[in-house]
């Protein structure tokens, strides 16, 4: 087992992650592969410059995979820990031109509320693979 530590600041997303997590087939696969029902929404992190190369490396590692329905993209799932104690998962959409400095995180709960986060707050994410 390996652990990558990525760091960045909380940002507001476009709402696309929320739409994706709402899909029944996505929920089912997250439940089956990671053991939790995802909260409808993602926590978005803009990675600092030092974390971007680690994310690139991570994208090449084996992961749980979201097998898409027609007209949707694949996604890779990695188990993660936030703030040293909150279990979560990182979703890496497998699409061309996805921003390399953005990390999308899902959990069974609203992470902004649970961790009292607002845009600009610094967050460390430990990714387990």
Image (cartoon, grey):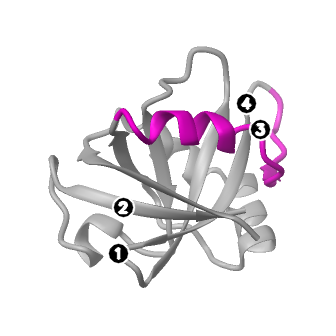
Q: Cβ–Cβ below 8 Å for labels 2 and 1?
A: yes
Label 3 vs label 2: CA separation? 21 Å
Q: Secondary structure at mark 2?
A: strand
Q: Nearer the viewer, mark 2 or mark 4?
A: 2
Q: Secondary structure at mark 3?
A: loop
Residue bearing the label numbered 4:
72
* Mark 1 neighbour class, 10 Å CA radius: few under 14, some 14 to 19, many 20 or more: few
Question: 118 left or right of 28?
Answer: left
Identify the magenta region.
49-70
Residue bearing the label numbered 2:
124
| Mark 3 vs 2, N-terminal side | 3
* Mark 3 neighbour class, 10 Å CA radius: few under 14, some 14 to 19, many 20 or more: few
Q: Cβ–Cβ below 8 Å for labels 3 and 1?
A: no
Is 55 part of what is drawn in magenta? yes
| Mark 2 vs 4, N-terminal side | 4
Front in this rendered view, residue 35 or 121: 121
Label 2 vs label 1: CA separation? 7 Å
């Amino acid at each position: 087992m390996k652990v990558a530590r990525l760091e960045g600041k909380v940002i507001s997303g476009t709402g696309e992650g929320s739409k994706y997590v709402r899909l029944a087939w996505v929920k089912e696969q997250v439940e089956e592969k990671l053991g939790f029902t995802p909260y409808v929404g993602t926590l978005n992190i803009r990675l600092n410059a030092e974390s971007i190369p680690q994310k690139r490396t991570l994208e090449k590692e084996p992961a749980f995979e979201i097998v898409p329905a027609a007209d949707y993209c694949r996604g890779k799932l990695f188990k993660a820990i936030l703030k040293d104690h909150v279990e979560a998962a990182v979703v890496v959409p497998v699409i061309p031109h996805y921003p390399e400095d953005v990390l999308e995180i899902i959990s069974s709960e609203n992470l902004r509320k649970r961790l009292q986060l607002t845009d600009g707050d610094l967050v460390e994410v430990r990714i387990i693979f």
